[in-house]
Amino acid sequence: MLGAFANAFRTPDLRRKLLFVLGIIVIFRFGSTFPAPGVNTANVQSCISDVQDNSVYSLINLFSGGALLQLTVFALGIMPYITASIILQLLVVVIPRLEALKKEGQSGQTKITQYTRYLTLALALLQATGIVALARNRQLLQGCELPLLHKEDTQTFLVMVITMTAGTAVIMWLGELITERGIGNGMSILIFTQVVATFPGALWGVQTSKGWLTFSIVMVIGLILVAAVIFIEQAQRRIPVQYARRMVGRKMFGGSSTYIPLKVNQAGIIPVIFASSLMYLPAMAVQFNQGKADQPGWINWVQKYLVDGSHPGYMAIYFLLIIFFTYFYVSITFDPKEVADNMKKYGGFIPGIRAGKPTEDYLSYVLSRITFPGALYLGLISLIPLIAFAVIQASQNFPFGGTSILIMVGVALDTVKQIESQLQQRNYEGFLR
């Protein structure tokens, strides 16, 4: 593997791409640590330690690499783009115009990407307004009464909102630069960078609070989990497809064999994001109702069963939501009827299965059964931080498990495969042997 890295850096154009990606990552991390105009950095740092274990902020802070609570230029991170992409994927199914654009090929996909950018900026403007408003009213970091801004006037408010929104636009641009001129998917690499940025601190936090023995056990379990995630992420069911020979003019086409790869984890990380977002709604409701004189009676019930991550009821609801959203997202992104129609159109068939409706039913049958272990896998991986929190009282930003390990392993595998393909084009021995 080290030899493959050496070969990659010996190739001028490949070395140029890798160094370009590293340069973009440095710029990205700098923007994630540079405070926005008007932020009282000293007060923010003194307040952050009080909310490190607050589950309301954990996912958003994860995707921003810790930049959200520090109110930096890139405080919103990649989250607005992720949200916009998910919304557009869902709208493609229900809006005929977007569905028609998707079928137009590259030109239609370019138009959908443009819509995603516009929606990202709108969401960024909305989120920046909410975050700066909370910071100005001293409600962003609960339990801290220190002023987070030097001046709490309208001018400072507008400057911070514009700065954070512009920061999101710059992040989108940086991601597209990596995709065009570097190696790998730009947005995925930026997400990977933000997650990895918080990983060493979270890991060292286990050592400082629990000692070397617990730290060693966590490391061993973490390595086993990484190996298991790699195994399942690469697992797939290959459905064989054969194409009949066709005569077009004087040329013979077809007669080849291929397969449809159905991954065990067909939905990726999206169900975890959906479930986490829903579980944050009760926590936010409790947070904004605490301290009131006329506090509603349901607050205590929600606090016990829907906010406390170590409660079995919370874990069960979270687990079931992940399973539901896995089936929901797979049903949206993979349409057996469309695949069966395309196969029939080009003369393809599954051996032993008739083309048309029988092929559609067979694909649905296989997909529903392969999705179930994938849903269980996502649910169990996502429960690891909650179980660790209940067993060893670790932070809810537990490094091994949940969203972080899925992102790190998934993006790393995809990037390594792309570097491998680049090396194979130049007749070098690559990473995967």
Image (cartoon, grey):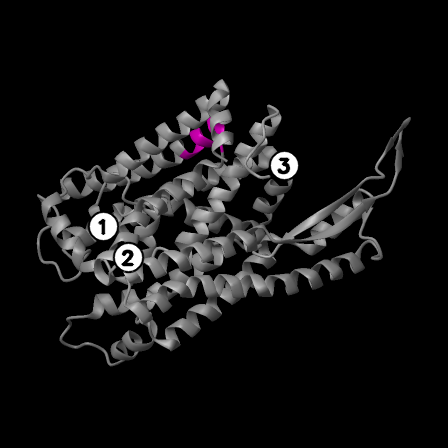
Mark 2 Cα-neighbour bin, 10 Å: few <14, some 14–19, many ≥20: many
The Cα atoms of the two marked residues, 2 and 3, are separated by: 38 Å
Is 44 placed above or below 189 here?
A: below
The amino acid type found where label 3 is placed reads: Gly
Name the residue at 42% across, 68% down: 318
Q: Is residue 424 above or below residue 115?
A: above
The circle on residue 105 is 3
Of tags 2 and 3, which is closer to the observer? Answer: 2
- Precedes in sequence: disc 2 or disc 3: 2
Residue 247 appears in view: yes
Say what amino acid the circle numbered 2 marks: Tyr
Magenta part of the protein: which range? 175-183
Front residue of 172 and 46: 46
Q: Is residue 177 magenta?
A: yes
Which residue is identified by label 1? 69
Q: Secondary structure at mark 3?
A: loop
For the residue labelled by badge 1, is the local secondary structure a helix, a strand or a loop?
A: helix
Q: CA distance from mark 2 to mark 1?
A: 8 Å
Residue 162 makes an appearance in the image: no
- Mark 1 belongs to which amino acid? Leu
Question: For the residues carrying marks 3 and 1, which lies nearer the camera in this image?
Answer: 1
The location of residue 429, given as percent across then percent down, is: 58, 30
Q: Circle 2 sits on which residue?
A: 57
SS under mark 2: helix
